[in-house]
Amino acid sequence: MLVAERHKKITEIVDEKGSIRVSELSQIFKVTEETIRRDLEKLEAEGKLQRSHGGAVSVKQEGQIELPYFEREIRNVKEKMAVADVAIKHVANNDRIILDASTTAWYMAKRLPDMPLTVITNSMQVALELSTREKITVISSGGTLLSKSLSFVGQLAIQAIEPYHVNKAFISCQGIHIERGISDSNELQSLVKRKMIEIADEVYLLADYTKFGIQAFSRIAPLEMIHSIITDSKTDQDFIRALQEMNIEVICP
């Protein structure tokens, strides 16, 4: 198979499946994983896909539909971990915090030390991750389970969150737009995240560089409701300056 033909087939497979691992492509095309990595690097440079930790994801789905959790888990891992590491520094003993069902919040939960905290979440993954920490009290929202994101949404989830007051909310999103605010691909997720923002004294938005300049399907909140944005070093400096002019703190590693 010619290289150009292999590249065309790789793009088609990624668009069809949404995401795929290097090892799978290596088996499909009977070439080494190093060859596949070079293929993915070239295809990413051409804007035909996006490389992720151990594989590739389709750029056609970005911000339009809610991707399955395992796909989001391998996307921009290095950047999400960097954001999570910074976010943890803003958690203090005896804080009451809320974590959404984003993979970045899950990375944050994985790194939280066993310290006196109360954590409210609508994420099964976050709740399970924190279940072994003796000093952390975990409150799960309940509600309707979305299998793609392993999260609880709907009116029951919102009603479960509403009575509480937290010091800090740590949430993510699919898009950050100067005029349109922050948005998500799933309307039900947006409604839960909006409630999380409403019950928090401080709101930290966890967002890697791919989220900026994007308008996803469902608006969560205007940027004025966000106190701080924690992002990675790849984020466009012009966007950062625009946010700072709106008196939004932008924190980078």
Image (cartoon, rainbow, N blue to C red):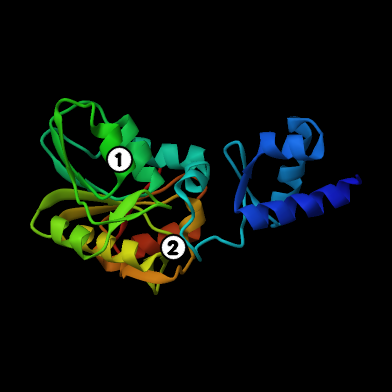
* Front position in the image: 227 or 172: 172
Q: Residue at x 40, y 51 (%)?
A: 149
| Residue behind mark 1 | 126
As drawn, the residue found furthest toward the bottom would be 179
Rendered position, 130 above or below 243: above
In the image, taking residue 224 as reference, residue 237 lies left or right, namely right
Closer to the chain start, of discs 1 and 2, is 1
Sort mark 1 into few (<14), some (14-19) or many (20+) by Cα contacts within 10 Å.
many
| Residue behind mark 2 | 175
Residue 106 in the image: x percent, y percent?
35, 40
Q: Residue at x 24, y 54 (%)?
A: 203
Rendered position, 37 above or below 115: below
Q: Residue at x 86, y 51 (%)?
A: 5
Q: Secondary structure at mark 2?
A: strand
In the image, taking residue 17 as reference, residue 62 lies left or right, namely left
Residue 200 in the image: x percent, y percent?
16, 55
Q: Amino acid at mark 1?
A: Val
Q: Secondary structure at mark 1?
A: helix
